[in-house]
Amino acid sequence: MGREVELLRAVNRLLREHRLHAALAAVKGFRNGAVYGAKIRAPHALVMTFLFRSGSLLDKLKAIAQATFTHSRNLAIFVFLYKGLLGAQQWLQGEKAQFHSFFAACVGAWFVFGDNNPVKSQINMYLLSRILFALSRLAVEKGYFPETKRDPFPLFAMLVWGVVMWLFEHHPHTLQPSLQSSMTYLYEDSNVWHDISDFLIYNKKSTGGFLHNKGSTLELTEHGNPHHRTSQTWISRNRASELTSWIPMPGKKNNLGQTQMKKSLLSSYFDI
C-alpha cells in the first residue's frame, strides 16, 4: 500500500512540473478529445443506426462502436497534434504568437480531417458556417464594417435561402446528394400526384424500383424488367425501407461480397 501511495505522489509531482506543462497539456488534450468525441458521436450513431440500418443487434452495436471509436480517435489525435505543435512553436520562439494557432491547426487538419468523405465533410461544413459568423462579428469589432442599427439576420436568411434555391433550381448537381434528395422531396415531388393516396397519404404511388449495376454503386430507377435479374434487381417498397448503405450486388462482387449504394437514391424514390 505504501508503494502505491509513493507512486501516486511521484506522478502528482511530475504533473506539477512547469517545464512539462506544454507536453502534458497535449496528453490531456488527447484525453479530452477522446472523451468528448465519444460523448457527441455515440448518441447520434445509436439513433441513426437503429432508425436506418438493418441487420442483427450485434451488427448494429458493432456499427455504433466503430462510428464512436472513429470520431473519438480523430478528435483526440487532432487535439494532441494541435496542442503539441502549439507548445513546440512557443518553445522555439520563446513567446506566443497569433499565427501559431493557425499553423498548428492547419497541420493537424491536414492529417486528421483532410480526407474527403461524408463524415469529415459534414464536420468541416459545420465549422465553416460558424467561422463565417465569427469573422463577421470580428470585422464589426475591428471597425472594418459599421455596426448596423437593426439586426442584419433577416437579410442573412434571405441571402442563404435565395442562393440555395437558385442552386437547386438551376445547378442542382453542385449541392450535396443528401441536400438534393431532401429538396427534391420538398419542391419537386410535391408537383406530382395521381389521386388522394399520393396527394396526402404517400409521397409516391410507385411500389418498387430497379437497382442497376453501375460498377462501384447501384442506381435506383423506375425503368427495367422485374424478370431480368442479371444486372438489375427489383425491390419492393417494404424491402427498400429495410435497406441500409450496404446491400448485395447481383452478378458482381467485391472483396466483401457487397457494394455500397447511394442511400439518398433509395430515400428519395421510396419516401423513407
Image (cartoon, helix red, strand yellow):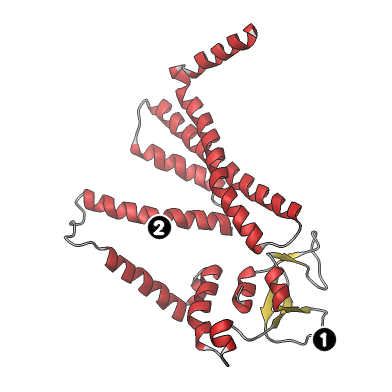
Quadrant housing the N terminus:
top right
Residue type at numbered disc 2: Ser
- The residue under the point 34% across, 34% down is 97
Q: Residue 153 at what x, y percent from top left?
A: 28, 63
Residue 129: quadrant of the picture: bottom left
Q: Residues within 10 Å of mark 2 (few under 14, many from 20)?
A: few
Res 111 visible: no
Q: Residue at x 45, y 18 (%)?
A: 19
**Label 2 to label 1, Cα distance in Å?**
49 Å
* Position of residue 119 measured from the top left corner of the image (x, y, whole percent): 57, 56
Residue occupying image coordinates x 68% and y 71%: 241
Give the mark, 2 or 1, whose residue is nearer the N terminus: 2
Task: State left or right for residue 248 relative to residue 166.
Answer: right
List the residue tagged with mark 2: 129
In the image, which disc is placed on residue 227?
A: 1
Picture quadrant where residue 102 is located: top left
Name the amino acid, label 1: His
